[in-house]
Image (cartoon, helix red, strand yellow):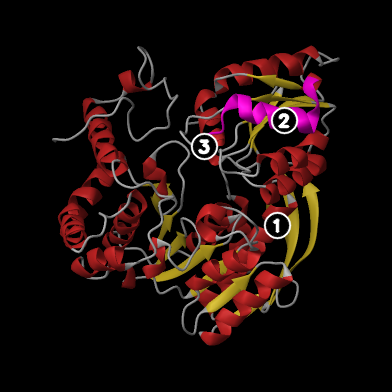
């Protein structure tokens, strides 16, 4: 296979050294598996050479053209389309569990990935294999090439990184074939490349200020873009929103003759009790009340994500009639959401969370207060340079005794010195430490936690790593969860 070779295997995040060192995982793989990883690295490099996923060009024409050449695979299955600012991936995974528990095949498209690009395209809950990812690319590459040439001849760009992955996902789902696709927007909605699907159900998770460079600086602008995924005669499951965001989504739904299920009016979290390893929830939908459902995810926000997932699945699979309670219980009992309030180790406890904006940080802090009893919690924080770092740090400050400022593996990661200056304004100089590398920051944080461990067995002390999905991904790899 010709093309560019990259320095790490399988589209992995930078920093994953285990797969490369003697005695590591790569040396234990079969020759076939190793070859598949090398081929995947080559394909990943080709795709990464395109415009990045945050480089939004307001048109769907290129993706539509490739899909047309492929025979419109996105029309071969029913779709639940998910937008919003926070909670999209967790909600996607919960929908997937519910649909699969009903005996249906699923395709899930989410972003960004934590460890390998293959995670973005999942069939029946499992990422496609490296070899399958390469096959999907080889299947669509000639048609991507046609659309690239046509666009460039008209003065436009080639398909972007995210556009190519969108095409690959939709083609893979049709080829599987799947019964239901769960599709998370990359960013925004109306001009997101996933918006070529005719979503039977649209889920709108809570909308807040984020990605202002691309989506606008007001809730109204952002909500308008996200409401663009609502399709004619669809069902819209709408999380609790600000008045401005709710009004915009409801208006968009009215134009499309779509039925809206509003949290707090048509659907609700009727009750919840924190429990060991998660929580027990009561969820009310238009069809009835589902009681005492164990959800192995931490935080009140996850109960609301479960409500959105249940309401959407109910609308898609049963036309609004109640689902079997036993099926719902079984589906949620196996729910996971890697990188979201995930405990990676103990003594001291190390928690990772992908919170990357103020609203996400608020949900994280509420969950920490509810589910843990830390006397001394150390933060390790790496935030992207285009984020509201002052607000994120201000939200985190009350639960963190000290903070170690660092950077993650992304080029967009905020400079350590610049971010530390902000942190000092929020925490005070005596509570702020710095490290240029995440592994160094984690080591400093663990030392600080152990220093203040009065018992000596990690009780009451911990480390919280947060600030970005990439930060979460990097630390998962460092601690062997990649």
* Image quadrant where residue 393 sits: top right
Depth-wise, is mark 1 or mark 2 nearer the camera? 2
- Counting labels gives 3
Residue identified by numbered label 1: 303
Q: Position of residue 240 (x, y in %)?
A: 71, 67
**Tags 2 and 3 touching, CB below 8 Å:** no
User: Percent from the top left, x then y, of residue 63?
Assistant: 30, 63
Highlighted range, magenta: 413-429
Residue at x 46% of width, y 33% of height? 411
The residue that label 3 is drawn on is 470
Query: Which quadrant holds residue 306?
Result: bottom right
- Percent from the top left, x then y, of residue 389? 66, 39
Query: Would residue 441 appear left or right of 99 to someone viewing this image?
Result: right
* Viewer can see residue 320: no
Task: Give the position of the N terminus as an image quadrant.
Answer: top left
Observer-side mark, 3 or 1, equals 3
Q: Please tell me in which quadrant of the rendered image residue 226 appears.
A: bottom right
Residue drawn at 39 percent across, 32 percent down: 12
Determine which of the numbered discs, if any, sits on residue 160 in the image. none
Foreground: 289 or 361? 361
The residue located at (78%, 12%) in the rendering is 451
What mark, if any, has residue 423 been given in the picture? 2
Secondary structure of residue under mark 2:
helix
303 shown above or below 227: above
Q: Secondary structure at mark 1?
A: helix
Quick check: 454 left or right of 290?
right
Front one among 89 and 398: 398
Task: First in sequence, mark 2 or 3: give its number.
Answer: 2
- Going by the image, does 293 lie left or right of 111? right
């Amino acid at each position: 296979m010709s093309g560019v070779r990259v320095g790490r295997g399988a589209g992995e995040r930078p920093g994953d050294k285990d797969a490369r060192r003697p005695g590591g995982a790569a040396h234990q793989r079969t020759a076939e598996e190793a070859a598949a990883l090398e081929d995947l690295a080559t394909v990943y490099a080709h795709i990464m050479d395109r415009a990045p996923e945050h480089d939004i060009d307001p048109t769907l024409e290129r993706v539509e053209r490739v899909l047309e050449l492929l025979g419109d695979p996105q029309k071969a299955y029913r779709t639940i389309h998910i937008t919003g600012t926070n909670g999209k991936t967790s909600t996607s995974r919960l929908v997937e569990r519910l649909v699969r528990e009903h005996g249906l095949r699923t395709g899930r498209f989410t972003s960004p990935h934590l460890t390998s690009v293959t995670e973005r395209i999942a069939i029946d809950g499992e990422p496609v294999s490296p070899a399958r990812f390469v096959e999907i690319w080889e299947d669509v590459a000639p048609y991507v090439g046609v659309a690239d040439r046509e666009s460039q001849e008209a003065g436009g760009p080639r398909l972007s990184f995210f556009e190519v992955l969108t095409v690959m996902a939709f083609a893979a789902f049709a080829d599987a074939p799947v019964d239901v696709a769960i599709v998370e927007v990359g960013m925004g909605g109306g001009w997101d490349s996933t918006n070529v699907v005719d979503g039977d159900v649209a889920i709108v998770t809570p909308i807040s200020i984020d990605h202002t460079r691309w989506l606008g600086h007001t809730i109204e602008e952002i909500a308008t873009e996200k409401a663009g995924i609502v399709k004619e005669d669809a069902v819209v499951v709408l999380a609790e929103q600000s008045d401005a965001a709710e009004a915009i989504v409801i208006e968009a739904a009215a134009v499309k003759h779509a039925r809206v299920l509003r949290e707090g009016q048509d659907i609700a979290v009727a009750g919840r009790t924190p429990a060991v390893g998660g929580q027990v929830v009561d969820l009310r939908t238009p069809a009835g009340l589902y009681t005492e459902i164990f959800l192995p995810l931490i935080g009140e926000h996850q109960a609301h994500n479960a409500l959105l997932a249940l309401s959407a699945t109910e609308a898609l699979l049963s036309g609004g009639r109640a689902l079997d309670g036993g099926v719902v219980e079984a589906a949620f009992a196996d729910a996971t959401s890697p990188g979201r309030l995930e405990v990676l180790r103990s003594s001291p406890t190390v928690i990772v969370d992908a919170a990357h904006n103020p609203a996400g940080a608020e949900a994280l802090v509420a969950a920490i207060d509810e589910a843990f009893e830390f006397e001394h919690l150390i933060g390790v924080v790496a935030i992207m340079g285009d984020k509201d770092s002052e607000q994120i740090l201000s939200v985190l400050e009350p639960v963190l005794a000290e903070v170690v400022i660092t950077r993650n593996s992304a080029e967009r990661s905020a400079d350590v010195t610049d971010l530390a200056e902000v942190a000092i304004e929020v925490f005070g100089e005596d509570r702020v430490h710095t490290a240029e590398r995440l592994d160094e920051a984690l080591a400093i944080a663990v030392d600080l936690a152990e220093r203040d461990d009065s018992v000596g067995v990690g009780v009451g002390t911990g480390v919280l790593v947060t600030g970005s999905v990439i930060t979460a991904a990097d630390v998962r790899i460092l601690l062997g969860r990649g």
